Amino acid sequence: MYDKTTPVRKYGLHEGDTGSAPVQVALLTERINSLTDHFRVHAKDFHGQRGLLRM
């Protein structure tokens, strides 16, 4: 699971800002990095890979 609070605090324009472009990019980057680590361990998780491609 990835941490959603750190990118929001780091890139948000104000507290609780989840809609601005920098925050959304940071959240997607965090999610992609988390899934990449997951696929290193679970190489045959084809459903997860499909979800990553649809992001």
Image (cartoon, rainbow, N blue to C red):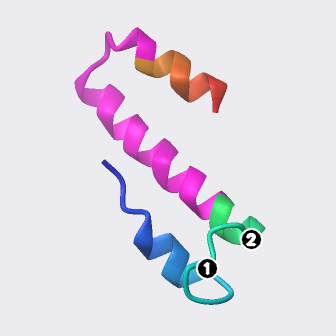
The amino acid sitting under disc 1 is: Tyr
Q: Is residue 28 above or below residue 23?
A: above
Please report the residue visible at 42 percent of the width from the left and 10 percent of the height from the top.
46
Mark number, residue 11? 1
Q: Is residue 16 left or right of residue 6?
A: right
- Disc 2 is placed on an element classified as loop
* The C terminus: image quadrant: top right
Q: Position of residue 34 (x, y in %)?
A: 38, 45
User: Are the residues at dot 2 and dot 1 in contact (C-beta closer than 8 Å)?
Assistant: yes
Measure the alpha-carbon separation of dots 2 and 1: 9 Å
Please report the residue visible at 50 percent of the width from the left and 43 percent of the height from the top.
32
Q: Position of residue 53 (x, y in %)?
A: 61, 24
The amino acid sitting under disc 2 is: Ser
- Disc 1 is placed on an element classified as helix
Q: Residue furthest right?
A: 21
Q: Which residues are magenta?
A: 25-47
Please report the residue visible at 30 percent of the width from the left and 48 percent of the height from the top.
1
